[in-house]
């Protein structure tokens, strides 16, 4: 519930900042693509969705001007999906928004309690993954 409430507030603030056309899945895709891009298949694997779903996400983001497809550096038929300047602007706004929300939450619950919460959540993640790799972060539609 805490995650859902925080995500709702985050998305509301992003909508107020002019990004009401994006959903959480788009932000997750941006995180995958931000360091040089990826193929649609790689995006599907990282998001834990089907290749068809990843293709639909890319098509949607391309129509909105957030990504573009380029020739893959390795050649062949593969296409590299990369972020546009519009997407990088969104990531900057989203980062500032998230930091502001974290600061507000720290004021409300106390920095010490928030730090303790982060520590305990990290411990839960480590225990549930046996210290190994994290699974794909499933998008919320």
Image (tube, grey):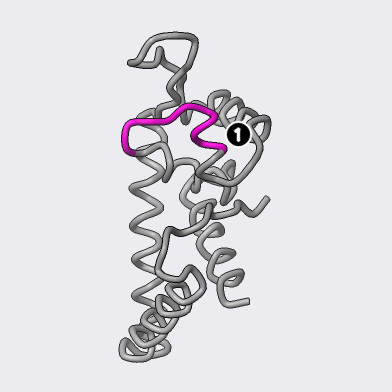
Q: Quadrant of residue 105?
A: bottom left
Image side of residue 140 versus residue 99, left or right: right
Closest to the observer: 85 or 74? 74
Bin the neighbour count of mark 1 within 10 Å (Cα to Cα): few under 14, some 14-19, many 20 and up.
many
Residue in view at x 39 percent, y 60 percent: 97
Q: Residue 118, position in %: x, y?
A: 39, 79
Residue that appears at 38% across and 84% down: 114
State the residue at coordinates (53%, 52%): 136
Give x and y (percent) for residue 96: 33, 58
Task: Residue 96: say if magenta.
Answer: no
**Residue occupying image coordinates x 41% and y 15%:** 70
SS type, badge 1: helix
Q: Quadrant of the N terminus?
A: bottom right
Q: Nearer the viewer, residue 105 or 78?
A: 78
Q: Give the percent coordinates (x, y) of residue 107.
A: 36, 85
72 lies left or right of 9: left
Magenta span covers which residues? 35-44
Residue 140 image point, x, y percent: 64, 54
Q: Looking at the image, which is closer to me, 20 or 32?
A: 32
Residue highlighted by disc 1: 54
């Amino acid at each position: 519930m805490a995650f859902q409430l925080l995500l709702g507030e985050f998305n509301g603030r992003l909508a107020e900042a002019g990004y009401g056309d994006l959903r959480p899945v788009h932000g997750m895709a941006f995180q995958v693509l931000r360091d040089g891009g990826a193929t649609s298949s790689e995006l599907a694997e990282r998001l834990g969705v089907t290749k068809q779903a990843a293709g639909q996400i890319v098509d949607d983001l391309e129509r909105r001007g957030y990504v573009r497809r380029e020739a893959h550096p390795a050649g062949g038929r593969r296409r590299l999906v990369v972020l546009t300047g519009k997407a990088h602007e969104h990531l900057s706004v989203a980062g500032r928004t998230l930091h502001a929300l974290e600061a507000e939450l720290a004021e409300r619950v106390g920095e010490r309690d928030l730090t303790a919460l982060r520590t305990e959540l990290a411990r839960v993640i480590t225990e549930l993954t046996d210290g190994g790799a994290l699974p794909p972060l499933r998008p919320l539609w």
